[in-house]
Amino acid sequence: MQKFWRSFMLLGLILTLSGVLLAGCTEKAPTQPTTATIPEGELDPAVWGKVYPDHYASYLKQKEQTKGNSKYGGSLPESHLKESPAQVKLFAGYPFSEDYNEERGHIWALEDVTGTLRIGPKTISSCWNCKSPNVKPLVDKMGDSFWSTPFAQLKDQIKHPIACANCHDPKTMALAITSVPLLDALKTRGIDPAKFSRQEMRTMVCAQCHVEYYFKPDNKKVTFPWNYGLKMEDAEKLYEEISFKDWDHKESQAPMLKAQHPDYELFSTGVHAANGVACADCHMPYVKQGQAKISSHHLQSPLNHISQSCQTCHKQSEEYLKNQVIGTQDAVYNTKVRLETALSEAIDAIATAAKNPAAKADMMNQARSLHRKAQWRWDFISAENSMGWHSPKEALRILGEGIDLARQAQLKANLGVGATVGGTPGPDAGKTPGAGTAAEAAGPETTPKQ
Ligand code: HEC
Ligand code: HEC
Ligand code: HEC
Ligand code: HEC
């Protein structure tokens, strides 16, 4: 009996100790005691801020515009086109070739969507999606007629940039999915959002917007191409099946796809997702705000708070972790630039060959189809916001495939007009590809292989 009590007490001691240890390493943020409540249907973050002043103060820091410790990201609305002129050619015939900036804080979403030159008289209200908490109640009221309503027509009713009501239930403050397109996409995939764990919700609130999407051809509704899964090929398969295109390329005439910002999809293929790490773990770490410890609502590059974002799990130095991120991004960036060069040369080859009356139609179509596939791969990584860091191996795999497909497109276009591998039809046209160069490279001294 005594023995039983001794082991019972020992067990108690172990449980208490492990409880203390666990509490120490999971760092639960203290939920703030509050008696006030948010009025139902309230969308204005300033009103929510009266009840949660520390969270509101943290949220307002999104106004800060700085490059910070970032090399490829940061919160300055820098032009992607100035930094990479090749992109103007890749987007020829599409508004992205005129205006395309780096993203910044959520609080800027309305200034940025109304300020971009990409918005014109033909723009529809689908473009309000992901920019404001006003969207959900409007869709509830208008149904699917919301999406194709002219953008300008709803301008007065879209009052707040992305705010509390996009991610929280005002009654309980629990995380909530309010995006109609995400709810639809989950239904398509047979996933019940009510079953998400709290940790999964810390990613899924971000997947409301940081995803690839297209406008459904019949009603222009924002739709996620997730029918077959989340990978780059899964979206491509759906787009092929419904013969979807965003535009015709002005120079190659290929039917093109524009990738949006598949942050969640790329992230899902990486080592952190596989280990249950959530977007909020790195982008909304616990920080001190005033007297309280809260989840940071100053969403930004984690490179600006490596100790809170990474060192909760990794014991290496800040310097090491920063260099790890930037070194990986450098590798992805350099590969991406090679793909831009390959795409640019493929576009030139197709445009040149298309002017030649001898061009074989089937080969030209194959070349265009290869251009479409190659550029989809480029854009999937280029439009994603982390310069590949969310899943480096997958990013490099996709870019590698893209380089191969772009060179195949160039080759097809050249062969379609009977040219040699390397270029436009000239005196060498019709010669076995590469034969001349191989013989020259071998040199006169080499004994021919038997
Ligand atoms: C393990 C940590 C980690 C997780 C988890 C994570 N990210 Fe990131 N994220 C980063 C890093 C590091 C960068 C690169 C920042 C830079 O270049 O300055 C980044 C970049 C970004 C950027 C661009 C930031 C900028 O300054 O331009 C966005 C947007 C983003 N992530 C969204 C997400 C979303 C959405 C998820 C979940 C689907 C997610 N991240 C999950 C670490 C993480
Ligand atoms: C982009 C989504 C998003 C937006 C917008 C947002 N939050 Fe949060 N909020 C979160 C996430 C994620 C957490 C962490 C929740 C968890 O771990 O359960 C959180 C946590 C909280 C908490 C719980 C305590 C804590 O710090 O973890 C409060 C209170 C809160 N947010 C208030 C607000 C207020 C007020 C606003 C508007 C000014 C706001 N949030 C805007 C995503 C968001
Ligand atoms: C309602 C749509 C929406 C939701 C929900 C959302 N985002 Fe965003 N996010 C955006 C948009 C739009 C931008 C770009 C705003 C701009 O440039 O004007 C952005 C920008 C960002 C940036 C760049 C900030 C900077 O300073 O460069 C980060 C980081 C980010 N989001 C992370 C997240 C994370 C993490 C979550 C989930 C906790 C999340 N977002 C949820 C739409 C959303
Ligand atoms: C919540 C915990 C957690 C956070 C926060 C976190 N990581 Fe990780 N990280 C992990 C886990 C778990 C692994 C997988 C380790 C393994 O498989 O051995 C990992 C793997 C890595 C790897 C190896 C990647 C690979 O391909 O094998 C690097 C590098 C890394 N993390 C950097 C970072 C950086 C930088 C940050 C902050 C921006 C960060 N991590 C934030 C848990 C975390």
Image (cartoon, rainbow, N blue to C red):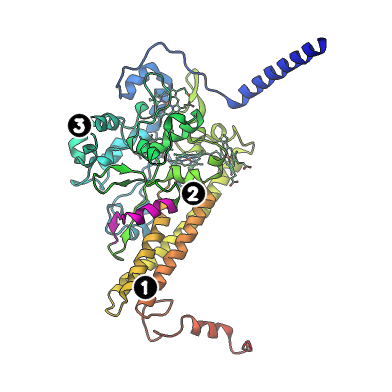
Above-or-below relation of 330 to 351: above
Q: Is mark 2 on a helix, strand or loop?
A: loop
Q: Name the residue under label 1.
A: 413
Q: Which residue is drawn at 60% across and 34% down?
A: 313
Instruction: Give the image quarter of residue 51.
Output: top left
Above or below 62: residue 437: below
Q: In the rendered image, which residue does mark 3 sit on?
A: 156
Magenta range: 233-249
Give the structural element (helix, strand or loop) at label 3: helix
Q: Is residue 344 magenta?
A: no
In the rendered structure, find residue 388 and report the number of the disc placed on it: 2
Amino acid at the residue labelled 1: Ala
In 3D space, how far apart are the residues under numbered discs 2 and 3 (Cα atoms)? 38 Å
**1 left or right of 401?**
right
Q: How many marks?
A: 3
The reply to whether dot 3 and dot 1 touch (C-beta < 8 Å) is no
Indicate whether residue 239 is drawn in magenta.
Answer: yes
Asked if 96 appears above or below 210 in the picture, the reply is: below
Residue 281: image location, x then y, percent: 52, 33
Choose mark 3 or mark 1, whichever is in front: 1
Report the Cα–Cα distance between label 1 and label 2: 30 Å
**Quarter of the figure with the N terminus:** top right
The residue at the point 57 percent across, 45 percent down is 323
Residue at disc 1, CB closer than 8 Å to ligand 1: no
Which residue appears at 28% of the width and 56% of the height? 247
Q: Which mark is residue 327?
A: none
Q: Earlier in the sequence, mark 1 or mark 2?
A: 2
Residue 208 image offset from top left, x and y in percent: 38, 36
Quarter of the image where one finds residue 104: top left
- Amino acid bearing label 3: Asp
On screen, residue 93 versus residue 450, left or right, reads left
